[in-house]
Image (cartoon, rainbow, N blue to C red):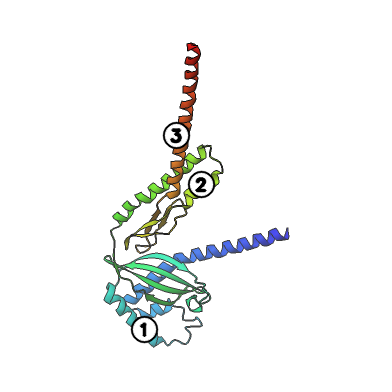
Amino acid sequence: MTKFSTFALLVSFALFTSCDFIKNTFTYKDKTENFVEALMDKNYDECINLMATDHETAKKTNRDSLKSGLDQFRAVIGSNFGDGNFEYTFMNAEKKRSTVAAENTPPNTTLAHIEFSNGKNIGVFQVLFDDTSNKILNIHTLEIKAEKPNMLLFWLFGILPLTVLLFNIYVIRKIKKSNLKRKWIKYLAVIVLNVPAISYAAVDGLSYKLLNFQILFGVGFSFMGYLGSVWTFGIPLGGIYWLWKLHQQKNLAFNTKSTSQIIPDSHEKTTENM
């Protein structure tokens, strides 16, 4: 009973933490949008109100120096993307844990990436949030400026991954109905052996990776803004192989049946002649 209670407590804690993290991700886009709109309007006091100035790493920051830095940041955004009225899309949020100390996010912080677009070009804000106040500790633009893509080609490309998915499901159903032994190994081969991988990203276009296995029925999909929109599918080698084997088995069974029907007829003729 004690072990069960401990396990239940750990699961509950994990679920609560995950739900809290997911809930916070919905606020990151809105807070970034509010900050950037205030920045482009030169409302630096509002920007500072949206920043975690009470955080230990920001307590000694001079307000006038901070306003000067915000003005320079505004100039960088304006020169590359215009004066505002951007569209914003949440891409991801993460807490980095690495053996390299410099790559870790500071304790009790979350790193978020928010894509923005002026209607013609897209860029990305990298924003560090304080987990206690959910305010901004640091914000800058990544060195990314790309043209807004035509999403029609992206969605049309999705026909190929969906075809691979349906093909692999079809092969698995054929295996299930067959008399093959140890079917779970065949299922695993169909699900895992999808290689090489071919990808189409909305921004970067077509690419392939020779030794990249698509282990979820041969298909991968990501939809996190324009920059994070990617279709991927693997060549279904496992499915092709086992469909061929099933076809061979069917032909062998058919030939065996045909032979067994011919032999009695020949025997009957021999008996009549005698």
Comparing labels 3 and 2, the label whose residue is closer to the camera:
3
Is residue 238 visible to us here? Answer: yes
Measured as percent of width and height from the top left, residue 73 is found at: 34, 80
The disc, 1 or 3, on the residue closer to the chain's N-terminal end is 1
The disc, 3 or 2, on the residue closer to the chain's N-terminal end is 2
- Where 145 falls versus 210 (above or below)? below
Identified by mark 3, the residue type is: Asn
Q: Quadrant of the N terminus?
A: bottom right
Q: Residue at x 35, y 78 (%)?
A: 43
- The residues tagged by marks 1 and 3 sit, at their Cα atoms, a distance apart of 75 Å
- The residues tagged by marks 3 and 2 sit, at their Cα atoms, a distance apart of 22 Å
Q: Residue at x 38, y 87 (%)?
A: 65
Measured as percent of width and height from the top left, residue 160 is found at: 35, 50
Q: Which of the 4 image quadrants contains residue 197? A: bottom left
Is residue 168 visible to us here? Answer: no
The disc, 1 or 2, on the residue closer to the chain's N-terminal end is 1
Q: Which residue reaches farthest right?
A: 1
Identified by mark 2, the residue type is: Tyr
Q: What residue is pinned by disc 1? A: 69
Measured as percent of width and height from the top left, residue 56 is found at: 51, 83
**Marks 3 and 2 close (CB-CB < 8 Å):** no
Identified by mark 1, the residue type is: Gly
Q: What residue is pinned by disc 3? A: 251
Q: Which of the 4 image quadrants contains residue 116? A: bottom left
Is 75 left or right of 140, judged from the image as shown?
left
- How packed mark 2 is, by other alpha carbons closer than 10 Å (few <14, some 14-19, many 20 or more), is many
Q: What residue is pinned by disc 2? A: 187
- Where 89 falls versus 49 (above or below)? above
